[in-house]
Amino acid sequence: MAKLYHFPLSPFCRKLRLVLAEKRIEVELSEERYWEQDPDFMRRNPAGKVPVLKLDGMMMSESTAIVEYLEEAYPDPALLPRGKQARFEARRIAAWFDDKFHHEVTSKLLYERVHKKVMGQGYPDSKNVKAGAQRIKYHLDYMAWLLDQRRWLAGDQMSIADFAAAAHLSSLDYISDVDWNRHEVVKDWYAKIKSRPAFRSILADQVPGFPPPPHYADLDF
């Protein structure tokens, strides 16, 4: 069986968990306190980051590279569209969330509110939290603009773009940092992807000291 070294509120780990579940690849989850730089973990990934996936005789790191491997090695169901332009758009939006959204929102809200405490790095920086709370509005507006024109974020087919976005937003939703009332179309999109079987294990996540809000696992939120 595959083994995934992960941290429950890492959006990059969540993205990979969603892809593995969607492709029906059974995986054992091993929670990793990666910031402690344990020698065994550093041998698995010298970069000292999660996720790390043990699969097909390999120890793989970097979520985007792993997703690309899974798409080639386990093509059913496909999480990238067929046309080259559509594939580009799916990759572009996935990168938007893993790069821009992560830098402007996830790192400012989730990492400040949760990761600092878990890692013993002190208290949240209020300036960062305020900046993240402001920037998420822009990103939700952009998502609404996309979804007003498309069925899914990158087009008419669900793709890795949707899983990348859902991974970040679900992590933030765990700490009630998403205003789902800002755009009905975004809330509808999240309800649709949140209802997929691939999401079940993520909705069951619990981080000691940080209980999720009542609506977190509610499919009818």
Image (tube, helix red, strand yellow):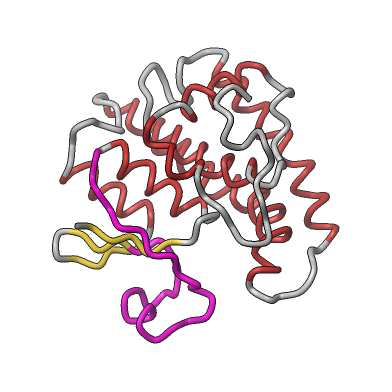
Residue at 14% from the left image edge and 65% from the top image edge: 57
Q: Is residue 212 left or right of residue 89?
A: right
Residue at 68% from the left image edge and 61% from the top image edge: 209
Viewer-closest of 69 and 194: 194
The x, y position of residue 116, in whole percent, is: 69, 68
Q: Is residue 154 above or below residue 75?
A: above
Q: Quadrant of residue 86?
A: top left
Q: Quadrant of the N terminus?
A: bottom left
The x, y position of residue 84, in whole percent, is: 28, 29
Magenta residue check for 153: no
The x, y position of residue 12, in whole percent, is: 46, 53
What span is colored magenta in the figure? 24-52
Q: Quadrant of residue 141?
A: top right
Magenta residue check for 25: yes
Q: Is residue 29 left or right of residue 104?
A: left
Q: Quadrant of the C terminus?
A: top right
Q: Is residue 67 above or below residue 28?
A: above
Viewer-closest of 147 and 6: 6
